[in-house]
Image (tube, rainbow, N blue to C red):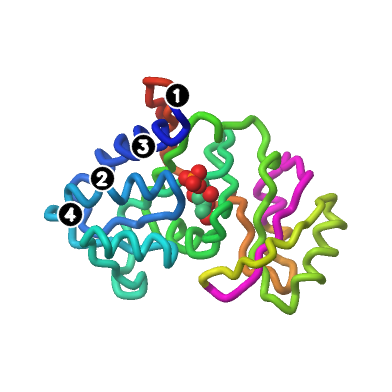
């Protein structure tokens, strides 16, 4: 099975978590795009979605699913999103697609966060995937120097602007032994909008496709 087929399979498996959920939180990425296409099949049963990116919003609208502002809907029952890395505590690195800030907001506002991924995303220790950090543009170099002090090698994701009009630093070479501590440390750097460690708010359920199997963590 190809990686994309694995993503498609796990996206389908998430459907059972959104039964009877009127407004679904929807993440960003290629795995979630498959999920959105499956949601289209049950759109008559749902009111709509809250979206974590302009890209997901466009796809949701294209398949006929109404998109609501988070401010208008309050607490979300279920949020479905992918991940770049997942550790055994269901803590994640996210932001490969640059949507980490809105993803964090929706995860925080959701009762249940269902993470969907193919098996290649599972790791023992987070950090082999370069850690995305969204920064206010004028703070980019300052934050980059702070990242070096933390032992990382920041690389500016050039020619990329987030949906919030900010920049992304991808921080290489971090071995994240204490995800919550590092998340808090980076959150406290002036100019950081959000860091892609989902440690304080991990996933509640992780669905992983491995060959023909869907493993639930
Ligand atoms: C976007 C994300 C995605 O969930 C993450 O990059 C995984 O993407 P994909 O499903 O394409 O592998 O965090 O900001």
**Mark pair 1, 3: CA separation:** 12 Å
Image quadrant holding the C terminus, namely top left
Magenta part of the chain:
164-183
**Mark pair 3, 2: CA separation:** 9 Å
Looking at the rendered structure, the secondary structure element under dot 1 is: strand
Image quadrant holding the N terminus, namely top left
Could you say where residue 34 lies in the image, as x and y percent from the top left? Answer: 35, 45
Q: Is residue 48 left or right of residue 35?
A: left
- What residue is at 43 percent from the left and 61 percent from the top? 106
**Mark pair 1, 4: CA separation:** 28 Å
- Residue 43 lies in the magenta-colored region: no
Residue hosting label 2: 38
- What residue is at 41 percent from the left and 38 percent from the top? 205
Residue hosting label 1: 210
> Which mark, residue 8?
3
Q: Which is nearer the eye, 5 or 209?
A: 5
Q: Residues within 10 Å of mark 1 (few under 14, many from 20)?
A: some
- Contact (Cβ within 8 Å) of mark 4 with mark 2: no
Looking at the rendered structure, the secondary structure element under dot 3 is: helix
Residue hosting label 4: 43
Q: Which is nearer the eye, 47 or 64?
A: 64
Could you say where residue 135 lies in the image, as x and y percent from the top left? Answer: 67, 69
Could you say where residue 28 lies in the image, as x and y percent from the top left? Answer: 44, 55
Of the numbered discs 1 and 4, the one sitting upstream in the chain is: 4
Of the numbered discs 1 and 2, the one sitting upstream in the chain is: 2
> Which mark, residue 5?
none
């Amino acid at each position: 099975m190809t990686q994309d087929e694995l993503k498609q399979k796990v996206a389908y498996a998430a459907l059972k978590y959104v039964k009877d959920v009127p407004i679904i939180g929807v993440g960003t990425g290629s795995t979630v795009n498959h999920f959105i296409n499956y949601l289209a099949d049950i759109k008559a049963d749902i009111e709509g979605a809250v979206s974590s990116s302009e890209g997901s919003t466009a796809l949701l609208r294209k398949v006929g699913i109404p998109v609501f502002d988070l401010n208008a809907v309050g607490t979300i029952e279920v949020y479905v999103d992918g991940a770049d890395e997942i550790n055994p505590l269901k803590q994640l690195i996210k932001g490969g697609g640059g949507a980490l800030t809105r993803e964090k907001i929706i995860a925080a506002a959701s009762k249940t966060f269902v993470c969907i991924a193919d098996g290649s995303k599972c790791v023992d220790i987070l950090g082999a995937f370069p850690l995305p950090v969204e920064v206010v543009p004028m703070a980019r170099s300052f934050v980059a120097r702070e990242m070096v002090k933390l032992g990382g090698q920041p690389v500016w994701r050039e020619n990329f602007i987030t949906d919030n009009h900010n920049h992304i630093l991808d921080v290489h070479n971090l071995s994240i032994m204490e995800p919550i501590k590092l998340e808090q440390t980076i959150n406290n750097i002036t100019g950081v909008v959000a860091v892609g460690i989902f440690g304080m708010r991990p996933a509640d359920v992780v669905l992983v496709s491995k060959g023909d199997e869907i493993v639930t963590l």
